[in-house]
Amino acid sequence: MKRARIVLADDHSLLLGAFKSFLEPEFEVVGTFLDGRTLVENAKDLSPDVIVIDIGMPLMNGLSAGQRLKQDLPATKLIYLTMNQDPDLAAEAFKLGASGYLLKSSAASELAHAIREALIGRSYVTPLITEGMVGSFVQNLKRKKPTHKLTLRQKEVLQLLAEGRSMKEVAAVLNLTPRTVAFHKYTMMEQLKLKTGAELIQYAIRNSIVGA
């Protein structure tokens, strides 16, 4: 039986190697990439059945990369990996066409299971975050189109949040306090008339605030 073709994308080379070693006995890993832009530029030539994408990658974050990959490879299944447990982020990933969503703290066997589920047309979400997703989907249906422009600092905060970083991580990168980052996040949501973090992330993608 022909093995499914898998592409892996993660900016941590050690993790990438570990995933490849674990998956190769069952699947054919046809490509590995360290950033979203290189993934988008090369994935089509590899004809993958499934692409496993880290959300927080450099040059182009995983959600933006996945959105473009779905245009070029509509039949290819996308499975997202992240360290962020925010159910809003998971909801946004599925809205953009995900077939699976796992935390990096999940067992490697869970990734293999998610790939199997995707290959037969099912979706898989790690049990670690499913509880909060129903509310996120409901809020997504009420999305409003924002019209206000953001400041440079707000864009910096939003780009990092959309890459899957926590508010604490954003604070460290920008040399701010987590409280200040939270202030910027909720100010943007109020300013743009958005109700959830998922809406804010979609705004970032649609307005090219995240990696282009």
Image: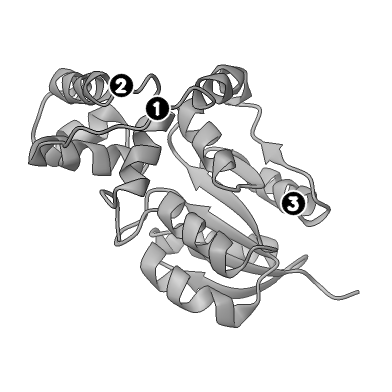
Task: Decide: is 173 above or below 199.
Answer: below
142, 109: nearer the viewer:
142
In space, the residues marked 3 and 2 are separated at their CA atoms by: 35 Å
Q: Earlier in the sequence, mark 3 or mark 2?
A: 3
Asked whether disc 1 touches disc 2, contact meaning CB atoms under 8 Å apart, the reply is yes
Q: Position of residue 199 (x, y in %)?
A: 40, 31
Q: Residues within 10 Å of mark 3 (few under 14, many from 20)?
A: many
Q: How many numbered marks, from 0 up?
A: 3
- Say which element carries label 3: helix
Q: Earlier in the sequence, mark 1 or mark 2?
A: 1
Question: Which residue, given by chain and number where applicable, does mark 1 sit on?
Answer: 144
- Say which element carries label 1: loop
Task: Decide: is 1 above or below 141.
Answer: below
Q: Position of residue 35 (x, y in %)?
A: 38, 64
Q: Position of residue 207 (x, y in %)?
A: 29, 48
Q: Amino acid at mark 2?
A: Lys
Residue 186: numbered disc: none
Q: Quadrant of the N terminus?
A: bottom right
**Residue sitting at x 60%, y 48%:** 97
> Closer to the camera: disc 3 or disc 1?
1
Question: Which residue, given by chain and number where applicable, does mark 3 sit on?
Answer: 118
